[in-house]
Image (spheres, rainbow, N blue to C red):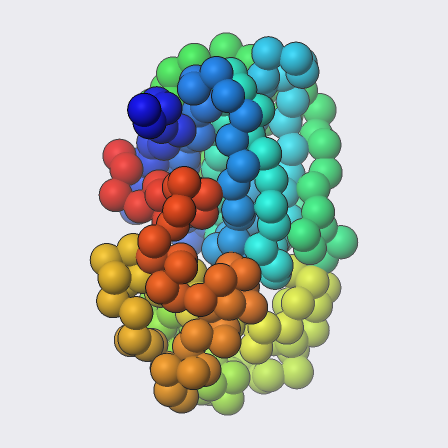
Amino acid sequence: MRNVEIQYQRNLPDKSLTEFVECFWMVENSTGMEKDVIVMPDANFDLVLTKDKDEPFQIYLLGLGTLYDKRKIEAHTKMVFISFKLLAAEYLLHKSIATLINKFEQLPNNFWDFEESDLNDFNAFSLKASQKIKMLIPTNIDHRKQKLFDLIYSSNGELTIAAFSEKSFWNSRQINRYFTQYIGISLKAYRNILRFRASFEQIKKGELFPELNYSDQAHFSREVKKLSGVNPRELHRNKNDRFIQVSAIGKK
């Protein structure tokens, strides 16, 4: 008999936040059993509030992932996330996340005035987080950076570095210096992760051929396996719902 599934919820930010926030999401393991999962690179970094039955309430900053990672979600655990786009590092957090590649940093338990009770109502958490972020958005943002990141996300990373540079009026050397300083990887490496993330929905639907700018089927399969640990067919099957980002697609 199948156990109760891990519960997911996802809220999109309002338009005023879309330069900085990909989404808010929640994961809850109320099955009574530990759950083995695989977390894949998804081109975002995250603020997470978490509590399980054996650990106190904690807040973490999770850096950008470049590798798939096998993790466990303990029984009776609930987590809520803010998935940030890259511009948030400089303009909301005012810090580099370069040292947090595939790592995390524990934050004070009152960071941004969050508290344990914010885990009780996901919609209320999303609203509270939205209001806090709106207060933190500065009035002066470098227009080159805004244009660059708009191009990166709208194209799913499929433009060339030269095209990003030309269209954002920011030379490629400066762009890569910025990525190294604030993000910790090159724009080229980030493009690969973003393109991979953009394939999640098509893979979940069973469309296992490359829709984006991969050179051929073999290239697509290699990139998927590099970043997920399995080939596209296995990722589509998602045995035991272990690839949580694929399992969560379509959840609201």
Q: Closest to the observer: 100 or 74?
A: 74
Q: Residue at x 65, y 22 (%)?
A: 58
Vertical placement of residue 119 versus 221, above or below: above
Vertical placement of residue 75 versus 191, above or below: above
Identity of the residue furthest to the front in this view: 1
Q: Is residue 153 visible?
A: no
The C terminus, quarter of image? top left
Q: Residue at x 70, y 30 (%)?
A: 107
Task: Give the x, y percent position of residue 175.
Answer: 61, 75
Q: In the image, is 188 to the left or to the right of 234?
A: right
Q: In the image, is 137 to the left or to the right of 101?
A: left
The N terminus, quarter of image? top left
Task: Give the x, y percent position of residue 245.
Answer: 42, 47
Q: Residue at x 38, y 50 (%)?
A: 238
Q: Is residue 106 visible?
A: yes
Q: Residue at x 59, y 73 (%)?
A: 189
Task: Give the x, y percent position of residue 45.
Answer: 56, 48
- Dividing the picture into quadrants, the one containing residue 92 is top right
Q: Closest to the observer: 129 or 224?
A: 224
Identity of the residue furthest to the right in this view: 99
Vertical placement of residue 209 versus 96, above or below: below
Report the number of discs: 0
Task: Give the x, y percent position of residue 212.
Answer: 33, 77
- Dividing the picture into quadrants, the one containing residue 218 is bottom left
